[in-house]
């Protein structure tokens, strides 16, 4: 059956290898199970429902990838996009979480249309590499700032806006310990380093008496009724869409597409022979469909996970790997009491470490060309300082077009870049 569904022999793979690859990828990306409820819970969403929505969205997304594209890529609510949802759209812009879910759904519709028409590739080709890299790095800095705040390492200071917290507090000390556990284990190539760090800090917090002991570990999953189909589309249409949709769509375009192409190259799924089709188009469609499914279930944008590279490294080559990932996310649904005792300072180190990994994109910026450097630097600096991914992207695109135009380098301006900058200017004009 698996041979017929996933064409294992055609990909020089077997059931055992694919199952091990799926388990490997799941271990490296399963930290989202605990991080996502903590982040989205700040909006007023029920953390139990978000936990279930996260697992279901990851499972559904991975199944779609498995059966539609037959690629070994795990799907789940994306880091960065969940932060923009919670701290940008709801926290800073004043939308309700129901309206934010509606924005995710509408961005998914646009994303699906862009993929279907081929405009997604046009957008990717049209955005300069420097800005793409700066956006990823800027989101990394934004995540790091959130991680420092939730751990208590950075606190509010009326005199200087920010200051350092109490390093004698158990929250800060355990967060720092968790960070070094994650870094050291990851450097030692231990699978699931981030998950181990989160669980280690949480267990230590229970042992030291800072967190109550859960009554049980296994239980019936919490109700998802509060987030399922809770979209407020009329409300978000009334409040204004341009900035929110633009950021969701652009980040989804860059993040998911870049991840899938990177993983596919590593698995040799793009350079196929004359007897086998390249499934990139189907993979992009699966990614788009997963966003729609996740928003209906009740979570922020679902996207392809770069951690899928670990499964590919373990030999995963087909959708059976993604299928195994989906099954494991469904099994985790019965561990909801465990998610309920994970404190924010246990997930903060994961945010900080993921942020540091995202900063590697800075190396892709051409630091010898100031017309590239300045817009890129503005983008990645503005995101944490304005506490808004949207503002950082807006400043970056607008400054890029202005600087290129007034230095008479018109040929370096793609229509897609000009269009996005114009939309951001329009957003400021009507705000």
Image (tube, rainbow, N blue to C red):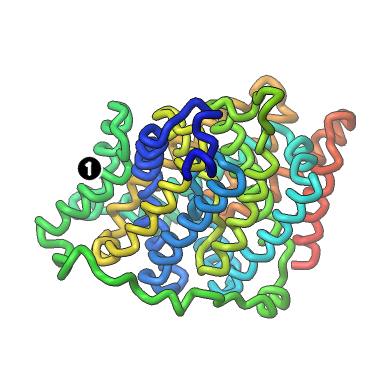
Residue 173 shown left or right of residue 290 in the figure: left
Q: Is residue 52 visible?
A: yes
**Residue at 26% in and 44% down:** 197
Whether residue 159 is situated above or below residue 99 in the rendered picture: above
**Crowd around label 1: few <14 · some 14–19 · many ≥20 (10 Å):** some
Whether residue 418 is situated above or below residue 371 in the rendered picture: below
Q: Residue furthest top?
A: 368
Residue 274, position as x, y percentages in the image? 71, 24
Whether residue 344 is situated above or below residue 30 in the rendered picture: below
Is the C terminus in the top left, top right, bottom left or bottom right quadrant? bottom right
**Residue at 56% in and 57% down:** 301
Q: What residue does disc 1 label?
A: 177
Residue 146, position as x, y percentages in the image? 43, 53
Q: Nearer the viewer, residue 197 or 149?
A: 197
Q: Is residue 163 visible?
A: no
**Residue at 38% in and 62% down:** 38
Q: Secondary structure at mark 1?
A: helix
Residue 386, position as x, y percentages in the image? 57, 54
Whether residue 286 is situated above or below residue 98 in the rendered picture: above
Q: How many marks?
A: 1
Give residue 416's quadrant in the image: top right
Residue 368 shown left or right of residue 175 in the figure: right
Q: Nearer the viewer, residue 254 or 136?
A: 254
Q: Nearer the viewer, residue 102 or 353?
A: 102
Residue 229, position as x, y percentages in the image? 56, 75
Residue 277 shown left or right of residue 14 in the figure: right
**Residue at 26% in and 48% down:** 175
């Amino acid at each position: 059956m698996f041979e017929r569904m996933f064409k294992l022999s055609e990909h020089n793979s077997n059931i055992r290898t694919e199952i091990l690859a799926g388990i490997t990828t799941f271990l490296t990306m399963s930290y989202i199970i605990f991080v996502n409820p903590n982040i989205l819970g700040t909006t007023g969403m029920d953390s139990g429902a978000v936990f279930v929505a996260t697992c279901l969205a990851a499972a559904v997304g991975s199944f779609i990838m498995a059966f539609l594209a037959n690629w070994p890529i795990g799907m789940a609510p994306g880091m960065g996009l969940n932060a923009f949802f919670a701290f940008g759209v709801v926290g800073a812009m004043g939308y309700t979480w129901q309206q934010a879910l509606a924005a995710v759904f509408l961005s998914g519709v646009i994303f699906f249309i862009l993929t279907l028409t081929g405009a997604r590739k046009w957008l990717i080709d049209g955005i300069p590499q420097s800005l793409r890299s700066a956006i990823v790095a800027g989101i990394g800095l934004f995540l790091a700032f959130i991680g420092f705040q939730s751990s208590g390492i950075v606190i509010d200071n009326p005199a200087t806006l920010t200051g350092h917290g109490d390093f004698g507090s158990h929250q800060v000390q355990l967060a720092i310990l968790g960070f070094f556990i994650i870094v050291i284990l990851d450097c030692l190539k231990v699978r699931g380093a981030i998950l181990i760090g989160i669980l280690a800090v949480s267990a230590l917090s229970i042992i030291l008496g800072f967190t109550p002991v859960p009554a049980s570990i296994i239980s019936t999953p919490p109700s998802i009724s509060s987030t399922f189909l809770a979209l407020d589309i009329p409300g978000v249409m009334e409040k204004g869409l341009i900035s929110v949709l633009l950021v969701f769509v652009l980040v989804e375009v860059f993040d998911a597409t870049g991840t899938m192409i990177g993983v596919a190259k590593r698995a040799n799924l793009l350079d196929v022979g004359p007897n086998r089709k390249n499934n990139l188009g189907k993979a992009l469609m699966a990614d788009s469909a997963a966003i729609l499914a996740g928003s209906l279930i009740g979570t922020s944008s679902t996207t392809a996970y770069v951690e899928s590279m670990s499964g590919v490294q373990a030999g995963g080559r087909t959708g059976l790997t993604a299928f195994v990932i989906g099954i494991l996310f469904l099994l985790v649904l019965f561990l909801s009491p465990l998610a309920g005792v994970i404190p924010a300072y246990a997930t903060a180190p994961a945010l900080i470490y993921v942020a540091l990994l995202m900063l590697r994109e800075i190396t892709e910026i051409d630091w010898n060309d100031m017309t590239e450097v300045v817009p890129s630097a503005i983008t990645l600096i503005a995101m944490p300082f304005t506490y808004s991914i949207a503002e950082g992207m807006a400043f970056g695109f607008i400054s890029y077009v202005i600087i290129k135009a007034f230095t008479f380098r018109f040929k370096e301006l793609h229509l897609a870049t000009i269009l996005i900058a114009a939309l951001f200017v329009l957003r400021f004009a009507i705000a």
